Image (cartoon, grey):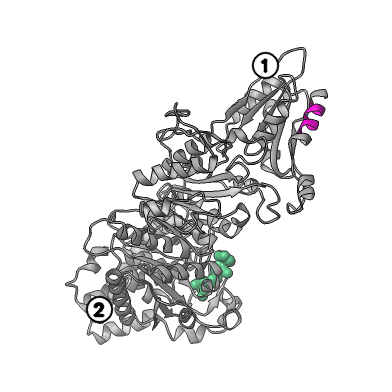
């Protein structure tokens, strides 16, 4: 009998047929676990975990999902995957990290799925970070609700739901409660399934939690909870069915707390015999034995059950043999799907349309977003204080909520992890989220989601799930902002692969890059210098520019020539490679020299216009890389190393990195702040030194 999803969803299916199908799958899961153990020599090359003990609740869920649904299984959920119709062969291709692994092409571990097939439930990229799927998956539910409330949802009878599966121990993590908070607050169509085996590797429930998830949920108003024996397939199936129906129809969150025993190892690498003292007790609760007894109670003949078991054993064995023989990825496959191709590859549109007056940088961004939201109903903006009352602490989103309504522009709680990570889910349902953290200093709580989920989704799903989002980050020092409102963070961000980073220094660049970011299918960070927003700081007047027209776009990876000079033999010249506020320190310092300074504004830090940088260095033979960050281990210092490597023969002096002092924070006192940060005067001295070299 072929196990397709449609088979389970056939409303006419009899209970006995359902039980037989479930038994076939449950026996498959067990047979696979046993086989992986027997074939340890082969399977131990890569780590794996299996669902043994958890199968009943997992199958009850997997078998009831529809193609329009999204599910986020965790690493112990191979039975959910069997339940939605994934074959043992496909699972084993991932087990052995083979080229045709349908989830990641051999990039990530067993039972770390991602799926985008028309007739299957969808699965966004799943990481190994416990609990980290909660935010992206809740983002999916938020996207579903957004689409329904703004009238852009697909018209289908059975509304889609999101399902997030979690281990009990992961539920103590802070990010998981951010997700619960938002699901409860916004009444999102999501089912949380918590599989409670009372183990957190070797730490037992008594050591690591003050209450179980049923009790914990009492603190989240509006998430209804069902506590069940997750080893009883029939009961599990009924409860899952009831919950799914409620969520589909009433569009509100629910949680199933399923109690289950862990019968297999934590993972193939952390083995049960090392520390478990409850195995005998747990074995009494084996869901497979229970289901087999239920089959007998429903008068299914032993001989029929034995036939199923025999067929499964043969299938699993053959699938394994075939998977072992399947081809490995080729080395060139490693380079595929780092970024999805963007349509914006050239500068286009009018940068300085006539008849317009100069606009401050903050408004250039605002107008860009206003144009985008007018044109694209899938565009929305959320973050702290961006809503109607304030429109952002820098008024960078002012008027947007009034114009587009509070469904499309809304305040979030102080949850940077949710703000960043939810975009994964929003993007997966076809939306274009533009989000904000209030200050670069507060990006840290969101960094985990940025690194673990956002930046790796496209690569680890082997090109299935690009995350199209814009994260706006007001950054930099702007005059006694003090240690928690002045920091620069670009070195940390540029170390994360899989994201693009813009750092514009003028209004025109900010608008053109914001547009390019929006049409880019990849995640983009917009670093927006607070000191340039209004050109209030002396010497930054040029940040205020004519506002480009609506169609104006700037491709990422194209530097801007701020100031050019010839290399004249009689006097040395040098080039300053910089970005953000550095553009103005450099421009003002250049006035003190006799046409000896070239200035290149990088505009985007990732991708980086290396060619333009090297060209300028080779022309002038002397180079300063100027940054607002502390110098050691910075992005600027690593760029200097690249310049050295590529331009060594052309250099007449060492590449000099000028930046802030290497101190832990920017002090609030204005004199101390001045001492720490670079400025025009300090730069002039550095230029003089380098020209003399
Ligand atoms: C954020 C994070 N910290 C630590 C780990 C290492 N780790 C892997 S599984 C695990 C235990 C998780 O327990 P639980 O969520 O109850 O799931 P179970 O394995 O019991 O099914 C830990 C600590 C991890 N993967 N992610
Ligand atoms: Mg556990």
Q: Is residue 265 left or right of residue 675?
A: left
Which segment did they paint magenta? Answer: 683-690
**Secondary structure of residue under mark 1:** loop
On the image, the x and y values in percent for residue 539 come to: 67, 35
- Asked if labels 1 and 2 touch by Cβ distance under 8 angstroms, the answer is no
Which label belongs to residue 476?
A: none
Q: Mark 1 or mark 2, which is nearer the start of the sequence?
A: 2
Q: Is residue 600 left or right of residue 317?
A: right
- Residue nearest the viewer, comparing 235 with 41: 235
Secondary structure mainly formed by the magenta segment: helix
Q: Is residue 177 left or right of residue 613?
A: left
Q: Is residue 686 magenta?
A: yes
On the image, the x and y values in percent for residue 624 come to: 72, 31
- The residue that mark 1 highlights is 566
Q: Quadrant of ligand 1?
A: bottom right
Dividing the image into 4 quarters, which one contains the C terminus? Answer: top right
- Residue at x 34%, y 43% (from the top left corner): 375
**Secondary structure of residue under mark 2:** helix
- Residue nearest the viewer, comparing 110 with 31: 110
- The residue that mark 2 highlights is 303
- Residue at x 25%, y 74% (from the top left corner): 18
């Amino acid at each position: 009998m072929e196990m397709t999803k449609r088979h389970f969803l056939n409303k006419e299916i009899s209970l006995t047929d359902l039980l037989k199908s479930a038994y076939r799958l449950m026996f498959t899961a067990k047979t696979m676990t046993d086989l992986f153990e027997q074939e340890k020599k082969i399977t131990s090359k890569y780590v794996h975990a299996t669902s043994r003990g958890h199968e009943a609740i997992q199958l009850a869920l997997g078998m009831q999902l529809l193609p329009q649904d999204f599910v986020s299984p965790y690493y112990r959920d191979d039975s959910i995957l069997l339940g939605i119709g994934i074959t043992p062969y496909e699972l084993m291709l991932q087990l052995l990290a083979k080229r045709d692994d349908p989830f990641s092409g051999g990039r990530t571990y067993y039972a770390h799925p991602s799926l985008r097939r028309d007739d299957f439930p969808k699965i966004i990229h799943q990481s190994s970070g416990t609990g980290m799927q909660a935010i992206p998956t809740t983002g999916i539910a938020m996207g579903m609700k957004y689409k329904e409330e703004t009238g852009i949802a697909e018209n289908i009878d059975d509304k889609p739901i999101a399902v997030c599966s979690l281990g009990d121990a992961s539920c103590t993590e802070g990010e998981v409660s951010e997700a619960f908070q938002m699901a409860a607050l916004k009444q999102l169509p999501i089912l949380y399934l918590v599989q409670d085996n009372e183990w957190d590797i070797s730490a037992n429930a008594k050591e690591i939690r003050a209450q179980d998830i049923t009790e914990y949920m009492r603190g989240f108003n509006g998430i209804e909870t069902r506590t069940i024996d997750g080893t009883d397939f029939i009961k599990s199936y009924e409860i899952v069915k009831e919950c799914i129906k409620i969520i589909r129809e009433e569009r509100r969150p629910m949680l199933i707390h399923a109690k289950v025993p862990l019968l297999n190892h934590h993972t193939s690498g952390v083995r049960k015999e090392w520390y478990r003292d409850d195995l005998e007790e747990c074995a009494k609760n084996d869901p497979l034995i229970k289901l087999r007894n239920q089959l007998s109670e429903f008068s299914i003949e032993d001989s029929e059950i034995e036939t199923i078991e025999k067929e499964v054993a043969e299938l699993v064995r053959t699938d394994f043999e075939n998977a072992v023989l399947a081809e490995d990825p080729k080395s060139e496959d490693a380079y595929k799907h780092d970024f999805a191709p963007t349509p914006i590859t050239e500068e286009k549109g009018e940068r300085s349309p006539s008849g317009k007056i100069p606009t401050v940088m903050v408004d250039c961004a605002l107008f860009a977003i206003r144009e985008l939201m007018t044109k694209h109903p899938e565009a929305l903006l959320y973050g702290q204080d961006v809503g109607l009352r304030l429109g952002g602490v820098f008024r960078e989103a002012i008027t947007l909520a009034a114009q587009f309504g509070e469904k499309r522009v809304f305040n979030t709680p102080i949850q940077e992890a949710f703000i960043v990570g939810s975009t994964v889910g929003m993007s997966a349902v076809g939306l274009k989220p533009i989000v904000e953290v209030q200050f670069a200093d507060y990006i840290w709580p969101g960094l985990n989601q940025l690194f673990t989920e956002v930046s790796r989704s496209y690569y680890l799903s082997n090109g299935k799930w690009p995350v199209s989002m814009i994260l706006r980050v007001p950054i930099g020092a702007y005059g006694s902002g003090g240690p928690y409102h002045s920091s620069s963070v670009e070195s940390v961000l540029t170390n994360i692969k899989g994201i693009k980073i813009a750092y514009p220094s003028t209004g025109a660049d900010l608008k053109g890059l914001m547009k390019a970011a929006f049409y880019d299918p990849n995640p983009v960070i917009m670093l927006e210098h607070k000191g340039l927003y209004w050109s209030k700081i002396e010497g930054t007047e040029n940040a205020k520019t004519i506002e480009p027209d609506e169609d104006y776009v700037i491709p990422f990876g194209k530097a801007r020539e701020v100031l050019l000079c010839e290399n004249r033999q009689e006097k040395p010249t040098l080039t300053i490679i910089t970005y953000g506020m550095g553009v103005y320190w450099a421009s003002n310092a250049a006035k003190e020299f006799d046409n000896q300074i070239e200035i290149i504004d990088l505009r985007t830090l990732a991708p980086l216009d290396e060619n333009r940088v090297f060209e300028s260095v080779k022309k002038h033979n002397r180079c300063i890389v100027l940054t607002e960050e502390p110098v050691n281990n910075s992005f600027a210092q690593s760029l200097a190393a690249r310049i050295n490597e590529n331009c060594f023969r052309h250099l007449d002096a060492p590449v000099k990195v000028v930046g802030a002092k290497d101190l832990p924070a920017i002090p609030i006192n204005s004199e101390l702040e001045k001492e720490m940060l670079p400025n025009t005067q300090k730069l002039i001295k550095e230029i003089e030194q380098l020209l003399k070299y």
